[in-house]
Image (cartoon, rainbow, N blue to C red):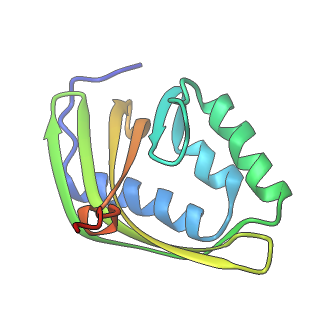
Amino acid sequence: MTSTRTPNPEEVRDAADAIVDAFRANDGDRYFAAFAPDASFVFHPEPTRLDTLDEYRTLWAGWIDTGWRVLECSSREQLVQASPGLAVFSHTVRTRVDNGDGTTAAYTERESIIFRVEGDRLVAVHEHLSTMPEQQPTEAVS
């Protein structure tokens, strides 16, 4: 049941920290438990929006099957914006992964997570991940 209660910034940060911690630990069960079944996801490397949690679970399972795993993940520059019934959490996230093929990759990205108040808990209903400007390729000027 959706509430009109305005979440406090600490509980929003705690909910976001739980997502980051589960992601860092490669704990899919705990990670996906933080999201509503109807959550949607926009990830810049993916060709389309993921419209449900099940779509993301399928994508995640494919990554795991290739040997992909998170090695490090940290959050900084956090901002919480709360309104009755919801909150927006945005931050800069630094992630290092094992690609499963003997290589690793590191990313610094911006991420927004929208939470809905459901009773006494916050449930993530949308996640948006985008590149940082300094990671955009630049065109050579001749």
Q: Position of residue 123 (x, y in %)?
A: 43, 37
Quick one: which residue is furthest to the top in this view? Answer: 1
How many circles with numbers are drawn on the protein? 0
Q: Is residue 127 left or right of residue 81?
A: right
Q: Which quarter of the picture shows residue 2? A: top left
Q: Is residue 102 left or right of residue 55?
A: right
Q: Residue at 85% of width from left, 55% of height from top?
A: 65
Q: Residue at 57% of width from left, 62% of height from top?
A: 23
Q: Residue at 29% of width from left, 64% of height from top?
A: 138
Q: Is residue 96 left or right of residue 44?
A: right
- Residue toward you, 62 or 77: 62
Q: Which quarter of the picture shows residue 115? A: top left
Q: Is residue 41 above or below residue 16?
A: above
- Residue toward you, 139 or 60: 139
Quick one: which residue is furthest to the front in this view? Answer: 142
Q: Is residue 51 above or below residue 76?
A: above
> Which quarter of the rendering shows the C terminus?
bottom left
> Which quarter of the rendering shows the N terminus?
top left
